[in-house]
Amino acid sequence: MSALDLPKVAVAAVNAAPVFLDLQATLDKVEDLVASAARDGAQLVVFGEAFLAGFPIWTAVLPPIDQHEWHERLIAQSIVVPSPPTERLARIARAHGVTLSVGINERNPNSLGQLWNSNLIFDPSGRLVNHRRKLVATYYERLTWSHGDAHDLRPVDLGGWRLGALICGENTNTLARFTLLAQGERLHIATYPPAWPFDGRSENFDYDLAELIRLRSASHAFEGKVFVVVAATALDETALQAVSRGDARIEKALTATPPAAMVIGPNGQVVAGPLTRPDAILHAEVDLQTEVVAKQAHDIVGTYNRADIFSLSVDMSRPAILRANHDGSAPNQSSIDGQRSTGHADAPAPTAEDRVVVTNHVGSPTA
């Protein structure tokens, strides 16, 4: 480690399929895969988008009126934060001494109709240190997931790592990416789905998901001079056959262009991967010291920025739909649905720091 506290980090990107719509069995699989990655030296283990307990691929290929069965099954296998499943994830991270990042289907504890596409990061002690909800559900995902918020749209220090995470299409959101970089992100997680059928006018379904993942990841790596760890959820035969039900066109749509796990360096070049083989783990060691020289040329949140010209404000509060007033005083900011980072209904009101962060400053922050 350098005097600047820039460590080398052993990362592992998991390219695996969940046990389709079976939360407990998928948690078992997470534990097995984390144990395997840790035995091979991983310090950071990353799972793909909505790994617990499956990406809603049916929204891409089935009419909405034919999706109710799938939505009911997904709701039944979703996760409230906090809950016994998140406690188990914490134990897995703690037992193997790793930082664990995993995508989940998160349910509103007070609504059986609302899900978020969320990502959780646990540190090696098992503490939940980052709880993100995808800002915008993309295209047909809106049949399943609500829009999220900017709560925890910040990197976690983790001994100099400055680890940030974005989910799928968020990695195309310029302002979301800049928000992380402007808060000192050094190591970036990007998670993706098992398939992304986009245009059915061509029987080839030639939306090259793996290549588009590489382009997005290389853009963030090169612009921010950071390392990017990409993990994708895979699609197994059980999920494919359950959703397609023998329809060859649907099968082709879901398998034509699979995603890939990869690690990309600050120069925008792939340093490990791409890995497309399912139920496999991609390992790499990244040296965060590499970012220093790269930023001598382009530091878009420092010397290559114009803080006197550009500014960005970000509301990082977690919205509340109800403010309770029990004693005649002014309503407080507590959320009745317990959607704050602590997961409790008596969580404190958002601070001014949560509400607005100016993220492009070079010197002192401005409101």
Image (cartoon, helix red, strand yellow):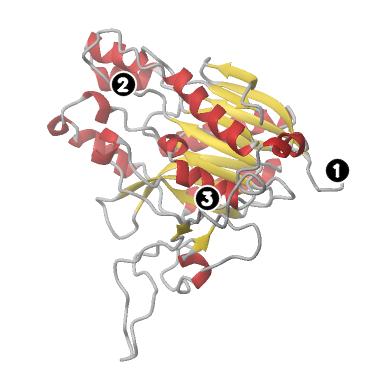
Query: Which label sits in the foreground, 3 or 1?
Result: 3
Asked if 21 appears above or below 354 in the picture, the reply is above
Q: Is residue 51 visible?
A: no
Left/right placement of residue 218 relative to residue 318 reads right
Disc 3 from disc 1: Cα separation = 26 Å
Which residue is depicted at the point 32% across and 85% down? 326
Camera-side mark, 1 or 2: 1
In the rendered structure, find residue 116 and report the number of the disc placed on it: none
Q: Nearer the viewer, residue 77 or 271?
A: 271
- Which residue corresponds to mark 3? 179
Mark 1 = which residue? 2
Q: Which residue is mark 2?
A: 197
The answer to which of marks 2 and 3 sits earlier in the sequence is 3
Tell me whether the residue at label 2 lies in contact with that at label 3, contact meaning CB atoms closer than 8 angstroms.
no
- The relative height of residue 253 versus residue 45 in the rendered view (above or below) is above
In the structure shown, which secondary structural element does the residue marked by tag 2 occupy? loop
Q: Amino acid at mark 2?
A: Pro
Q: Could you tell me residue 110's position as x and y percent?
A: 30, 60
Does the image show residue 327? yes
- Which is more N-terminal, label 1 or label 3? 1
**Amino acid, disc 1:** Ser
Q: Residue 241 sits in which quadrant?
A: top left
What SS does tag 1 mark? loop
Residues under labels 1 and 2: Cα distance?
45 Å
Q: Residue at x 41, y 24 (%)?
A: 194
| Residue 192 rendering spot, x and y as whole percentages | 45, 30
Residue at 52 percent of width and 60 percent of height: 358
